[in-house]
Image (cartoon, rainbow, N blue to C red):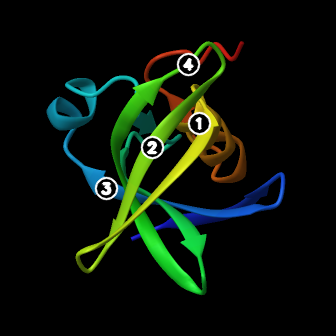
């Protein structure tokens, strides 16, 4: 599976993409991409490196004006951290640029 490793501020992230059928990608337009060969991909997993282990994004747990508390998990261990609300949009934008993909839904960053 293709992945993009990127730094944002002082944090390490990894976005893992999965090749899929057009119908499955179109069903998730905010996480879907297409390349020049008409292959479709979706953002399967967004991960954060914390204490030398990769934690997978689960969901936001609390919303603020600019930041939201998010839950990340690894093998039953949970990690909560505040990130900007548009973290997934930023990850998708970086994936599109780094892998020369076209997002199925335009990303508008605040």
Q: Position of residue 16 (x, y in %)?
A: 44, 61
Q: Are marks 1 and 2 in contact (CB under 8 Å)?
A: yes
Name the residue beneath numbered marker 1. Answer: 87
Q: What element does badge 3 sit on?
A: strand
Q: Position of residue 100 (x, y in %)?
A: 65, 45
Mark 1 or 4, nearer chain start: 4
Between disc 1 and disc 2, the foreground one is: 2
Mark 1 or 2, nearer chain start: 2
Q: Is residue 93 above or below residue 106?
A: below
Q: Is residue 32 shown left or right of residue 86?
A: left
Q: CA distance from mark 1 to mark 4?
A: 14 Å
Callout 4 environment at 10 Å: few (<14), some (14 to 19), or many (20+)?
Answer: few
Q: CA distance from mark 4 to mark 2?
A: 11 Å
Mark 3 or 4, nearer chain start: 3
Q: CA distance from mark 3 to mark 2?
A: 26 Å
Compare residues 101 and 14 and report the one nearer the observer. 14
Which picture quadrant has residue 86?
A: top right
Q: Is residue 72 above or below residue 84?
A: below
Q: CA distance from mark 1 to mark 2?
A: 10 Å
Q: Is residue 42 shown left or right of residue 89?
A: left
Q: CA distance from mark 1 to mark 3?
A: 22 Å
Mark 3 or 2, nearer chain start: 3
Work out which quarter of the rendered image holds the C terminus and state it: top right
Name the residue beneath numbered marker 4. Answer: 64
Q: Residue at x 60, y 87 (%)?
A: 52
Mark 4 or 2, nearer chain start: 4
Between disc 3 and disc 4, the foreground one is: 4
Q: CA distance from mark 3 to mark 4?
A: 34 Å
Compare residues 61 and 18 and report the one nearer the observer. 61
**Label drawn at residue 70:** 2
Q: Is residue 27 shown left or right of residue 32?
A: left
């Amino acid at each position: 599976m293709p992945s993009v490793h990127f730094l944002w501020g002082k944090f390490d992230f990894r976005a893992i993409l999965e090749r899929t059928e057009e119908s499955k990608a179109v069903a998730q337009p905010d996480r879907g991409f297409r390349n020049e060969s008409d292959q479709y991909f979706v953002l399967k997993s967004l991960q954060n490196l914390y204490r030398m282990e990769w934690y997978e994004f689960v969901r936001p747990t609390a919303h603020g004006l600019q930041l939201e508390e998010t839950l990340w998990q690894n093998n039953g261990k949970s990690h909560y951290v505040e990130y900007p609300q548009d973290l997934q949009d930023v990850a998708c934008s970086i994936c599109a640029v780094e892998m020369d993909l076209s997002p199925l839904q335009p990303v508008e960053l605040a």
